[in-house]
Image (tube, coloured by chain):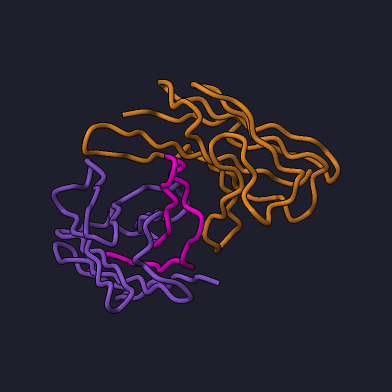
Amino acid sequence: QLQLQESGPGLVKPSETLSLTCTVSGGSISSSIYYWDWIRQPPGKGLEWIASIYYTAYTYNNPSLKSRVTISVDTSKNQFSLKLSSVTAADTAVYYCARRHYYDSINAFDIWGQGTMVTVSS
Amino acid sequence: DIQMTQSPSSLSASVGDRVNITCRASQTVSRYLNWYQQKPGKAPMLLIYTASSLQSGVPSRFSGSGSGTDFTLTISNLQPEDFAIYYCQHSHSAPRSITFGFGQGTRLEIK
C-alpha cells in the first residue's frame, strides 16, 4: 500500500523559506501515470493547489504562487520537495503532499499524506 | 481562472437521508470534476473522479453526475461516518500548463 509522509519544520519566520519533503513508501515515485503534488489548507479554510512534479522533473505551478515556489524530485530517495520563499502569515497552513492520477486526464488526487502544519511567525 | 461554487455551504441531514451537493463551474470543465470527503484533522479522501466514477473502496451510496458546468454529488442512505466536509475539484489544461481548483466546501452536519 503506497503511503506519503510529509516532513519539515513546523515553524518558519516571516520572509524566510519554507521547506518540506514528501517521502513515498510502498511504491515507486518513477511511475508513468502519476504526478506528485503539494496542496495546502489554511486553518478553517479550503484547499489550494500549489505545485506538481513528474518523476522526470517536469513541473507545473499555481500561477498565484509561481514566483515563490520551487518543487523538485529525488527519484533515488523516492522523495519530492517543496520550497516556498518569502513566506508571510498568509502561508500558515496544513501542507499536504498527494499523488495525482493523470492518465486519461483524470487528474484526481487519489492518495494523500497526513499533512503537516506549518506556522509562519517570528 | 475557473471558479468553482458549491451549494449549499452547509447542510443538516439525518441518518438514512439522501442528500445532494452541487458544484458549478464558471466555465465548462467537461467531465474533469472530482469529489473529496474530509473529516476533522484528516486529509481529504477521493470519492468520485471524472464526475461519476466511484473510487475503489468507496461505498456505493456515493454517486456523482453532471458534465460541462453543473455537477452533483449524491449520498444515499446517510451513515454516521458520512458527516464531513465535501469538496469538488476541477482541472484545467492549456498548452504547457495545467491548474487545479477546489470548491469552497460543503459541511454536512447531523440533524
Q: Quadrant of residue B11?
A: top right
Q: Compared with residue B91, is residue B70 higher up or lower down, i.e. above or below?
A: above
Residue A103 counted in the magenta span: yes
Say which residue appears at 28% left-offset and 72% top-offset: A75
Q: Magenta span covers which residues? A: A97-122
Say which residue appears at 24% left-offset and 38% top-offset: B97
The residue lying toward the viewer, choosing from B44 and A41, is B44
Left or right, A51 with respect to B46, comes to: left
Left or right, B36 with respect to B17, comes to: left
Say which residue appears at 32% left-offset and 34% top-offset: B93
The letter of the orange chain is B
The residue lying toward the viewer, choosing from B64 and A86, is B64
Say which residue appears at 42% left-offset and 53% top-offset: A100
Whole-percent x, y for residue A46 in the image: 45, 46
Whole-percent x, y for residue A97 in the image: 39, 62
In the figure, the shade used to draw chain A is purple
Left or right, A32 with respect to B53, comes to: left
**Number of numbered discs visible in the structure rendering:** 0
Whole-percent x, y for residue A74 in the image: 25, 72
Which corner quadrant holds the C terminus of chain B? top right
The residue lying toward the viewer, choosing from B27 and B11, is B27
The residue lying toward the viewer, choosing from A56 and B97, is A56
